[in-house]
Image (cartoon, rainbow, N blue to C red):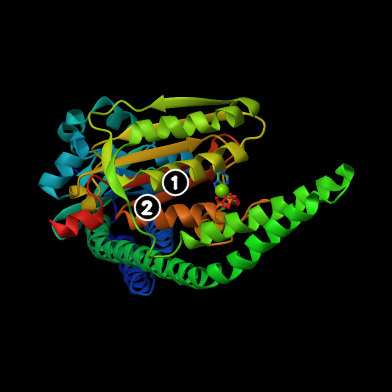
Amino acid sequence: MKSIEDTHRGAPGRRRSRDLQASAAELLKSLNMIVGLDQLLEILCARMREIFCSGTVTISLFDPITRRYAGMMARGLDAQSAALFGFFESNPLVRWLNVNQSLLNVRVDRGVFEFLSPEEKLVLETHRVALVVPLIALNRLTGMLFLSDKEDGTGYTRAEIDILLMLAGQASFAVENAVMTQFQEERLKKLFHADKLATVGELAAGAAHEIRNPLTSIRSTVQFLKKDLPPEKHGYVEGVIEEVDRIDGIIRGLLSLSKSSELHLSRVDLREALQQTLLLLDPELKRNRIAVNQEMRIGDPTVEADQAQVKQVFLNVLLNSVQSMPGGGTITVHLADRPDGKREESIDSVRVTLSDNGPGMPEETIRRVFDPFFTTKENGTGLGLSITYGIVHGHGGEIDIASKTDPSSHGTSVTIRLPRKAKKLMSEV
Ligand SMILES: Nc1ncnc2c1ncn2[C@@H]1O[C@H](COP(=O)(O)OP(=O)(O)OP(=O)(O)O)[C@@H](O)[C@H]1O
Ligand SMILES: [Mg+2]
């Protein structure tokens, strides 16, 4: 890095250096006060761009689920271009930063630049990236900071690079903290949710018996009265019976939220369960002109589970997809036996992803989809996904929903992970 341009010698240079230090100190102070990850990344990008007069600043962070560094935030660049700053652990750039744990000055370290892959070079060149700064926490490369050439066309000075490195060091810790906080919050939310479901389930279990008895007598009484009515009035009775059955269905749904619903475990072939569920839905799929893409070739598609409950899960999720695409669309059913990289997935499990290209859901809906009785449908009970959540967690599995409403790419994707051995059995061994 000997040839770094040092144009700021003398009085103006000293002034610039003092300003730099003051701005850096101010940024450092504010870093400690920000808790949210998005806000932190936003401030980092914006302030770094101002302080160093960079054309663009982009931050990529490691995502332990996809085991990829993904472009998370940028200033001076649109979101689509920022997404191009995505790299795998095996990429030469990532490997070099991991080993050297030092800044890459693209304009100076040409040898290193030449060693990068053609895709990496293209991203760096297209966006005129001059500096790549590693974000290191606990000796791990947790992210990368990309600064493009300066807006005035001058090179980065030694003083600027020193301050940048100091800021990056502190920023790494702040980012790592924010990531951990977000992770904890998500866990707490899930715990809170599981608790809420169990409470609703217990309440329902108590009330169900009381409601079902009179319901049964209403049903049989109107059925009995039907024969005394003229045929043109039979429709009224059937209407009442239909409504009674609907109430009964809701109660059954509520009951399955209860923690105590017992699992009848057997070896379940998930591919078969999915195919049977699709067969059940066939008339609905045809009526709505929905095509199904099956990507289900895995070595062992079986898990230990309650067969009826697993089918119920698939039915609830697929039905939502069908209902979201009255004008036609595509559903993709994907099975994978080695889920990628998630930490807790040392537990052997099978992952099922059910995706549609329907309209997707806005953020407020995604947040509430698992809440009992949350529905946006005129005739929905809002229990489908709460029941699904209860069943998946009852098996020691996990369920996640991702949804997009962009006009150019929209749809919903539900990922269900089921352990090969249901939790109940695992604790027995
Ligand atoms: N694939 C999807 N596409 C768009 N929105 C969805 C999708 N899946 C779920 N939703 C949204 O989530 C809400 C809750 O879904 P959930 O299955 O729990 O209840 P519901 O479908 O409304 O009623 P029920 O399943 O009890 O008949 C839906 O009303 C809908 O707004
Ligand atoms: Mg539903």
Query: Which residue corresponds to the image point at 56% horizontal and 43% vertical from the top-left?
Result: 320
Q: Secondary structure at mark 2?
A: helix
| Quadrant of the image occupied by residue 117 | top left
Looking at the image, tell me whether mark 1 or mark 2 is earlier in sequence order: 1
Query: Which residue corresponds to the image point at 41% horizontal and 40% vertical from the top-left?
Result: 83
Looking at the image, which is closer to me, 9 or 425?
A: 425
| Residue 120 percent across, percent down from the top left | 28, 32
Q: Quadrant of the C terminus?
A: bottom left
User: What amino acid type is highlighted by mark number 2?
Assistant: Val
Mark 1 CB within 8 Å of ligand 1: no
Looking at the image, which is closer to me, 91 or 296?
A: 296
| Residue 348 percent across, percent down from the top left | 20, 45
Left or right position of 172 against 256: left
Q: Secondary structure at mark 1?
A: helix
Please, is residue 361 above or below residue 51 in the view?
above
Q: How many angstroms separate mark 1 from mark 2 (CA)? A: 8 Å
Please, is residue 343 above or below residue 167 in the view?
above
Disc on res. 313: 1
Which residue position holds label 2? 392
Please, is residue 214 above or below residue 123 in the view?
below
Left or right position of 63 against 409: left
Mark 2 CB within 8 Å of ligand 1: no
Looking at the image, which is closer to me, 407 or 316?
A: 316
How many residues crowd mark 1 within 10 Å: few (<14), some (14–19), many (20+)?
many
User: What amino acid type is highlighted by mark number 1?
Assistant: Val
- Residue 378 can be seen, yes or no: no
Left or right position of 365 against 162: right
Looking at the image, which is closer to me, 214 or 316?
A: 214
Q: Are marks 1 and 2 in contact (CB under 8 Å)?
A: yes
| Quadrant of the image occupied by residue 338 | top left
